[in-house]
Amino acid sequence: MKFSKKRLEIIEKLAIVGGIFLALFVIGYYTGYIKTNCKLDKTCFDEALKKCKSVQFIYVDDNNVYSYEAWPGVGEGCFVRVTLERVQAGASQDFRNLEGKSMKCKLSKTELETTNIEQFDNFIKFCHGELKEGVYEIIIQRIYSNLVSNLGDVIKKAEEVLGK
């Protein structure tokens, strides 16, 4: 089968355009640009997450609204970004300061199968970002406050002894 020069040029251009579209699709998939939007459907999110597919999900817990985005990484890893979209009414200023903050987590596919992604303490060790830092800062402040309030008398005595 013999093709004319013009026909070969057209086929070549179509192959290049097709290759570009394929590359854009692969890049979009692996960067998480192409996502399934599960909205509030936890089952949809869990199924997609177990397979490490690109997915979005809104999770509401005690009137706190979190958005979850997951996408596959290169190799065995899967990325999850958690953003605290809205804090419940009446929350302390410390928690209100966390609104809009997010953290990015990298979990292996085996870790995804055993981790409850809605419970921060189950997966926060795989994360980094402003939300994680803010949560830890609040925890440390509360521990410090409890320690100081419970050891107030001891601290006063120690200050008296050290101050003399």
Image (spheres, helix red, strand yellow):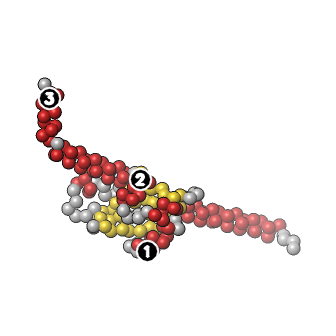
Pick whichever, 99 or 153, lies toward us.
Answer: 153
Circle 1 residue: 43
Q: Is residue 93 left or right of residue 119?
A: left
**Other residues around mark 3 within 10 Å, as few (<14) / some (14–19) / many (≥20):** few
- The structure residue drawn at horizontal position 75% and vertical position 68%, both measured from the top left corner, is 10
Residue 161 badge: 3
Question: Which one is closest to the eye, mark 2 or mark 3?
Answer: 3
Q: Is residue 54 visible?
A: no
Rendering coords of residue 8 (x, y %): 80, 67
Above or below, 23 relative to 130: below
Question: Which one is closest to the eye, mark 3 or mark 1?
Answer: 3
Q: Which quadrant of the figure contains the N terminus?
A: bottom right
Q: Quadrant of residue 96?
A: bottom left
In three-dimensional space, the C-alpha distance between marks 2 and 1, rounded to whole angstroms, equals 24 Å
Q: Is residue 10 visible?
A: yes
What secondary structure is marked by label 1?
helix
Question: Which one is closest to the eye, mark 2 or mark 1?
Answer: 2
Amino acid type, mark 1: Thr
Q: Which quadrant of the figure contains the C terminus?
A: top left
Amino acid type, mark 2: Lys
What secondary structure is marked by label 3?
helix
Q: Quadrant of residue 7?
A: bottom right
In three-dimensional space, the C-alpha distance between marks 3 and 1, rounded to whole angstroms, equals 61 Å
Rendering coords of residue 19 (x, y %): 67, 64
- The structure residue drawn at horizontal position 77% and vertical position 65%, both measured from the top left corner, is 9
Circle 2 residue: 125
